[in-house]
Amino acid sequence: MASLAPPADTLPTAPAPYSPAELEQFGLCAERMPQHIAIIMDGNGRWAQAQGLPRIEGHQRGVLVVRDIVEECSRLGVKQLTLYCFSSENWKRPELELKLLMELLERYLIDERPEILRQNLQFSVIGRREGLGEGVLREMQRTTDLSRGNTGMRLCLAVNYGSRCELVDAARALAEDVKQGRLNPEEITEEALADRLYTAGMPDPDLVIRTAGELRVSNFLLWQISYAELWVTSLCWPDFDREVLLSALRDFGSRNRRFGGLSS
């Protein structure tokens, strides 16, 4: 089937990465930048209701913010950005909202494909595929395939994702390997389990950002964020912008990450 994405040589040039001097102007230092940022994008519905708008309008506004933040992280030199788009618990929402969210996700995958190629991003998705529509699954695979050879920032979407489900799936994979004689019980290590997570091969997040002021991690990357720094803003996701991102990065750069050790 023909690709919906335009040829790479017809796309406008991606914005250049920021220079060390530009990073310094922002109050940042490349050596103290997070390599992997994970964001819990919360508050779309609340933002819309506060404006007197339908909840789906908040999600649509949130998609525009995603585009800006993805480009900014890429220019800042972030190696991976993981966005919590739809949790396995979100199926509890009203049927109409779920239908509109799936339509919005499919449209995002189509509309943003040229941007993903333009910015040389590596695209991936983590989460269970059960329950997702055929169109969403098709466009996920197309974007993944088309960006496979890219060498820029990895953009990872967590869709129908729940960390407890992920750990259960990893435990099942370990149990099956033991059952089939491919693995001895004493060979089950942290590395062996990590290799069977959805995020196998990805670095753990250094920084987790959450919007809308909620002080919880909501079943997001529970294994992977063991030593991540947490940063919370009361702003809802549609109001998150470049300046807020830079504030989070400056705060991250000021922290002393000891990983269980002592300060130097």
Image (cartoon, helix red, strand yellow):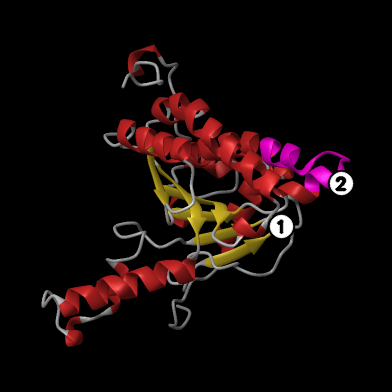
Residue at 45%, 68% in the rendered image: 165
Which is more toward the observer, 198 or 134? Answer: 134
Q: Is residue 52 magenta?
A: yes
**Amino acid on which disc 1 is placed:** Thr
Residue 231, given in percent of the width and then of the height, sits at 63, 62
Q: Residue 146, relative to residue 46: is it above or below?
A: above
Q: Which mark is residue 257?
A: none
Q: CA distance from mark 1 to mark 2?
A: 17 Å
Whether residue 135 is in magenta: the answer is no
In this view, the residue farthest toward the left is 181
Quarter of image, res 87: bottom right
Residue 233 disc label: 1
Residue for point 73% across, 52% down:
43
Identify the residue at horizontal 35%, vertical 21% (top origin): 3
In the rendering, at what x and y percent does residue 18 appear?
48, 35
Quarter of the image where one finds residue 250: bottom right
Q: Secondary structure at mark 1?
A: loop
Magenta stretch, residue numbers: 47-61
Give the residue at mark 2: 50
Q: Position of residue 79 (x, y in %)?
A: 40, 47
Residue 121 visible in the current orientation: no
Residue furthest to the bottom in view is 186
Q: Give amino acid for label 2.
A: Ala
